[in-house]
Image: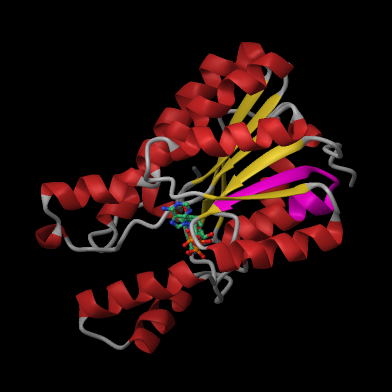
Amino acid sequence: MDLGIAGRVAIVTGGSRGIGRAAAERLCREGAHVAVCARGRDSLADVRRALEAMGAGRVLTVAADLTEPSAAGRVAEAAAAAWGRIDILVNNAGAARGLPFDELTHEGWLENLQLKLFGYLRMTREVLPHLRKNGWGRIVNIAGVAGLQPSPLAMPVGLNNAGILNVMKALADAEAANNILVTTVCPGPILTERQTTLLQDTARAKGISVEAAEREATAAIPLKRMGRPEEVADAVAFLASERASYITGSLVIVDGGLHRAMI
Ligand SMILES: NC(=O)c1ccc[n+]([C@@H]2O[C@H](COP(=O)([O-])OP(=O)(O)OC[C@H]3O[C@@H](n4cnc5c(N)ncnc54)[C@H](OP(=O)(O)O)[C@@H]3O)[C@@H](O)[C@H]2O)c1
């Protein structure tokens, strides 16, 4: 299926590894211009090489720590300066911890919201004027099933994701008249570096080995395996595309059947 986004300009936050990198690759393969931001310069150089091989001149990497208030503006400016427009934002950079309630101070809660919830909001604020100018736009947010299914071992993760789901549903209403479609993807456990950290947190909280935590997590998934970043990226690319022109305010769950409810 031709997704109809060749020549569109996309920003993928946290696009140097994991789900973000897979999404950046997928959009690039569809012919989009792709700006990727993350902190680590080595992994940015690596993703730049990989993307350039798919689309020379259609790749931009920006080293940025999105917990810094000015970083989102810098990323948006760099993409707009390179290609004169922004059409698609994939909000993905996030790394909240799976800490139990007793270990979370007030500062700990704020710190865990800085990158994901507040980072998505800052990035969205910077990109929206560009999308409005086009009269066409897509904002695809990566939340997670912890936002739908609260867990005592993933409270900061759940708060970030629930906040994103709520705010982005409201934004979808607010921006519908501008032809800016806002959607959220909720992955279940996906095999990335972040998954390793989450399994370590779970193992520590439960007093079991990381291997046992992984076995437990996998056993709970109807498809009996964790997902691959590319499986999330396919959903992201579709939602970011022309083909998703009647989908806004929606939530798409990519979790191997883990979430036990109809929505
Ligand atoms: N993996 C899962 O099982 C899973 C499940 C549900 C939801 N999710 C969500 O999916 C998203 C991606 O997760 P992932 O598993 O792909 O993570 P990952 O493999 O750890 O990759 C995270 C990406 O974000 C970047 N990043 C981290 N901190 C940043 C910061 N302060 N500023 C800018 N970039 C930053 C990282 O690069 P640098 O470190 O170099 O900055 C990297 O490119 C997250 O929002 C996560 O909550 C993941």
- Which residue is rendered at x = 52% and y = 15% of the image? 174
Asked whether 153 or 135 is in front, the reply is 135
Horizontally, is 167 left or right of 3 in the view?
A: left
Q: Is residue 240 visible?
A: no
Residue furthest out toward the right: 2
Residue at horizontal 63 percent and vertical 37 percent from the top: 78
Residue 232 point in image, percent of width and height: 63, 57
Query: Relative to 94, is 26 on the left or the right?
Result: right
Question: Considering only vertical position in the picture, is 54 above or below 9?
Answer: below
Say how many tags the image has: 0
Residue 137 highlighted magenta (yes or no): no
Locate residue 260, reporting x and y percent.
Answer: 45, 55
Question: Which residue is situated farthest in the top direction here?
Answer: 177
Quick check: 227 above or below 4? Answer: below
Q: Give the magenta part as a residue range.
A: 26-37
Which image quarter: residue 197?
A: bottom left
Please state if 64 lies on the left or on the right of 163 as rendered: right
Quarter of the rendering containing residue 82:
top right
Front-most of 36 and 153? 36
- Residue at figure coordinates x 37%, y 42% from the top left: 68
**Image position, residue 201 (x, y; %):** 29, 72
Q: Which residue is at 55% across, 76% downward? A: 224
- 250 horizontally vs 47: left or right: left
Front in this rendered view, residue 57 or 140: 57
Q: Is 27 a magenta residue?
A: yes
Res. 257 visible in picture: yes
Q: What coloring was used for the rendering?
A: secondary structure
